[in-house]
Amino acid sequence: MTAVDDRPQAASTHEVGRDRRRKEDQRLITGRTKWTDNLVLPGMLHLAMVRSPLAHARITGIDATAAREAPGVIAVLTGEDVKDLQGSLPCAWPITEDQKAPPHPAIAVDRVAFSGEVVAVVAARSSAAARDAAELVDVDYEDLPAALELRASAQDETLAHPDLGTNRSATWVFDSAEAGTGSDVEDAIAEADVVVEREFRQQRLIPAFMEPRSTVVDPTGEQFVMWSATQVPHILRLMLAMTLGVDEGKIRVIAPDVGGGFGGKLQVTPEEIITFLVARHTGKPCKWTETRSESLLSAHHGRDQWQKLTLAAKADGTVTGLKVELLADMGAYLGLVTPGVPILGAFMYNSIYKFPAYHFSCTNVFTNKTWTDAYRGAGRPEATFAIERIMDELALELGRDPMEVREQNWITHEEFPFTTVCGLEYDSGNYEAATERAKELFGYDELRAEQQRRRESGDRVQLGLGISTFTEMCGLAPSRVLGSLNYGAGGWEHASVRMLPTGKVEVITGSSAHGQGHETAWSQIVADQLGVPFEDVEVLHGDTQISHKGLDTYGSRSLVVGGQAVINAAKKVIEKAKPLAAYQLEANVDDLEFSDGKFTVKGAGADQEGVGLAGLALAVFAAHDLPDGMEPSLDADATFDPVNFSFPHGTHLCAMEVDTETGATTMRSYVCVDDIGNVVNPLIVEGQVHGGLVQGIAQALWEEAVYDDQGTLVSGSFVDYTLPTTADTITFVTDRTTSPATSNDLGVKGVGEAGCIASTPAVVNAVLDAIRQFGVKDIVMPCTPERVWRAIQDGTAGAMSETAGAAAGHFAEGEPNQDPPGTGAAPAAGTTQEGGQA
Amino acid sequence: MAMELHHTFTVDAPPEATWALLTDLEQVGGCFPGATVTSATETEFTGNVKVKLGPIGVTYQGEGRFVERDDEAHRAVIEGLGKGLRGLGNASAKVVLQLEPEGSGTKADVATSLNITGKPAQFGRGVMQTVSDKLLGQFVECIEGKLTP
Amino acid sequence: MIPPEFDYAAPTTVAEALELLAEHGDEAKVLSGGQSLLPVLRMRLNAPGIIVDISRIEELKGVTEVGDAIRIGAGATYQDVLDSALVREHLALLHTTLKEVADEQIRHRGTVCGALAHADPAGDVGAPVLALEGRMVIQGPDGERTVDGADFFVDLFETAVGEGELLTAVEIPKHTGWGAHYEKFVRVSHQWAIIGVAAAVRTDGGTIAEARVGLTNMGSTPLRARAVEEALVGQEATEEAVAQACAQVAEGTDPPSDLNGQADYRKHVAGVLTRRAVLAAAGA
């Protein structure tokens, strides 16, 4: 740690900061736990979805006779059967007043708008019977032209939803001159000594959580009970009520153990609505569990943008303006927060740099593909990638070291709190400290020297260094800010602390963990606050009947917002216990102090016994002898709404080796030094950082959702959606610097997304840095060996003034970056990848 | 997935004789590997195609018809649409035939395109593409075979 | 994922298996390790009437020495073969290739003969078996016949094994003392080979006396690069000489184009990998 938190600590800190093994892991890794798909209820039916194989088509007829007659089948429902019941799936974030969007049916009624859309559901006595019968549902389609490629779709060449009249859903603009937070970017560009313009492609990704989605609905009690593999049980309950017109009090949603989400389970899904409808229709408990193929095909995707950046700078390298123009692919429909995802990045393109002028505009576009929505980082990885790529490009234009140019422009640690050109106040940070530590761990200067040697010797394996000095906004979010962005809800979080008569403590949190380790971290926090043993704290979450209020888990918000709510509730418990303690100690309330779980009288000496919280809890339970007028309860609730985001940051350095003969890339080393403020559990943090890094690296090197020219997802299994495993990654070097957040008592900033946000540009910058000497300017992600090799071929051809012949052509129409010669493979015969590149 | 195959060959028979055979939908339809023509008229046919290849075994049911037929110019366009059984997705094919006299014989130009949507794409690695290319190749070879005594 | 319904039979003798195959004709599918068939069934890209599981046939198990060859029974898993001292000693190329097949779990279930019968050109075992001149033993209603690699691999997923027949073993001539290397090119470790090159080399005092080169996923079947093998004979095991001999390896091949690479890229990389594989096999 290069910085020290010297603020006074209210509570003792025996637990916070310890690398406690996770409480929840024993049951999770031994499989003795309850996933949604493990649930078996009496008389339960199993559902199978019938999905459209076509990207865009009119449904001209559905013959379900054979399916209805198949063995074990109880019901088959089509869109026609439920059209008056199913409502429209919710979008909670209409980004503009005039946003256009088609209705979003759970089961398509007369038209399908993407391949994978549900057209019917079969309920049967077994899951095998349901699947067999689903194949017997005979659907007639009349093909419609499909809008597939994002840029062509933005031009309305083919309409994804003919009734809408356009594919453009909305355009959202932020301008620093208009907002009064900065100057005019066009002036900055006009007056600039250096203008760097680049286009980048954010390929489409698939969240690929480990546990496939699953939903069980039991309609047999007073409340409908829905178990679902969701990140957002509270939001789901509210949305079910609003979408289906069912009294909210009659719905209970439970997220049991949930196996990962990465934003992919931040959704209200068609299948959840359908399971509910079928359960209500049949009067029996119903279960739906997806196959992996269904998951890749129909669970929402992420990213998928074209980014155009214009950066203005002075000759000395000082940045003077940044203009960002985005096209974002919504896919066929707007999901829960689909339109807002690119907007979450709007305030992050300026990143850690002191741009005086900034303009951001984003046009959201419909296509006939699976809809996109939140995926780890949601908007911020895209922003970080673009700014960190173009800062390298600026350095290149200036002929300077990329780190030096960054340093020249970033906010120095003396300048915090710093109000950015977007109007956000960065409360704390120290970019110099993180960078210094990262460079030291990385051996930056030695690697640069080796790179030079390899270049000079013409080594077949070239070395490149990539930098990403990132920041992000976490802790979603101040409700006031969300309101100003038209978001449909607030960003507070709720918690309760219950003192049990035995002295044990129950903590109820509105965050909904799905792998993050809340049970452990919250126990550590409460153990310190109340002075009780770590083991005595039980954390409950994810059931709207137990945790009646909450806004769930996403956007690195749990600890920053939910953790503070827990602290506030714990503090209230202490305050409620104080009069009873004073009564028992026969002292004045004002003379008491609380520490290590005990009230003592100030100045009464170290050997006094005092009264412990456990004893007080029992006394309150008995309620035989309480001060007059005291309510017999120590339990307390708290709802916390942050006033600001938190801003983790860090310096990530990556060294990549490129085999110039084949284009294969190998990671040589990866160092990250993150400043995520104070840390509750370093082991959990390490896990979040490692997992995040791999997901970000995967965008750079491996993953892409690819559609063919018919709108069929051809990367529809893990054969082609090349998800990495541990065998593909190296040992990361991680460290931290600490500048505590000022927005919460713990001084924490959030770490759920940091690795994923930071790593992608570090890797791509490194790959490019290894082969720029061949004239390579850009490589489209993922940087496959073929793309890298072609980039080298094209670059070399250009540099040697040879006419291209052997290698693939130059930038094809639809390729990012206008500067020829470029990269990118020719499209596979007959298949068109996203954006026309392959 | 969309596949295109262009094939040209010459036969000894004169264009008229060749044309008669090529416009016999039962013959043309039956040339598709694994195809069984269940009924055929002058202008359309119905049938099924069983694609059996290694581990894969899928069946399409469908129909085909002339969408264009010019007996003078010896040009025809045949379209076929197959619906995959068991929720497989669709396959559609378009065949453009053009005959021209060449010496005493005929030069035949066959342009076929095939579109496949749905589940076969899940097999991955572009294998279905290779499969389709192969099927198209066999189709055209069969036609050529029928014309070449 | 649940496959469509099928009948299941697990014969314990080859004769019984052949009877079942004869009885059910093209409704029957043979299940060995299931690493290729089960995914296809689960994707519902096939719905056979009956699965004939040959994994309980004792006579098909094991790796044995048969004269100057090593016989690998149809019941032998990749791991059985990897663990075989005979294979390690006499078929170094097969041994080293099998280490690269998929992952640990798959290697414990999948079988070498199952992969050969599946005839996926991206599968790893075809190239070394072809290069080492393995002979496939096929049993059918009319008895046993032996087919060499060139005749065995017919096309994509197509082999010389006819309806009602069963691949019962592969016999591979010993290549004792040959150096060997399998160069597998993938983006992520568990992936099918984008390209693979299997090379075995017998050197004689720094000179290549004999060479065998097999290619994975460079066409609709595994391929043997005979021209390269011939060009290598008599060459010094130096980078320059080997590179020259391997330069034309892709000539005449027809590799696929897919998300991992276009045909022209595969052809280029094949040249690079062949050079590397041969040099590694030669210990250079």
Image: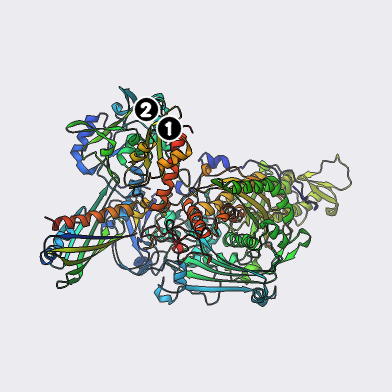
> Residue A270, percent across and down?
44, 61
Q: Are marks 1 and 2 in contact (CB under 8 Å)?
A: yes
Callout 1: chain: C
A338 lies left or right of B30: right
Give A801 or A233, whichever is nearer the viewer.
A801
Residue A597 versus residue A304: which sits nearer the camera? Answer: A304
- Write the residue at 24% across / 33% down: C17
Q: Dot 1, crowdedness within 10 Å: few (<14), some or many (≥20)?
A: many
Side of C8 where A742 appears, left or right = right
Observer able to see residue A539: no
In what quadrant of the picture does the C terminus of chain A appear? bottom left
Residue A531 falls left or right of residue A109? right
Q: Disc 2 designates what residue?
A: C175
- Which residue is at a point 26% across and 62% down the rendered structure image? B112
In the shown orientation, is residue C19 left or right of residue A204? left
Q: Position of residue C115 (x, y in %)?
A: 34, 38
Q: Secondary structure at mark 2?
A: loop
Badge 2 amino acid: His
* Residue at the image point whose x is 73% and y is 51% from the top: A436
Q: Which of pointers 1 and 2 lies earlier in the amino acid sequence?
A: 2
Q: Which mark is residue C180?
A: 1
Residue A342 occupies which quadrant of the picture?
A: bottom right
Residue A191 horizontal/vertical position (percent) = 68, 75
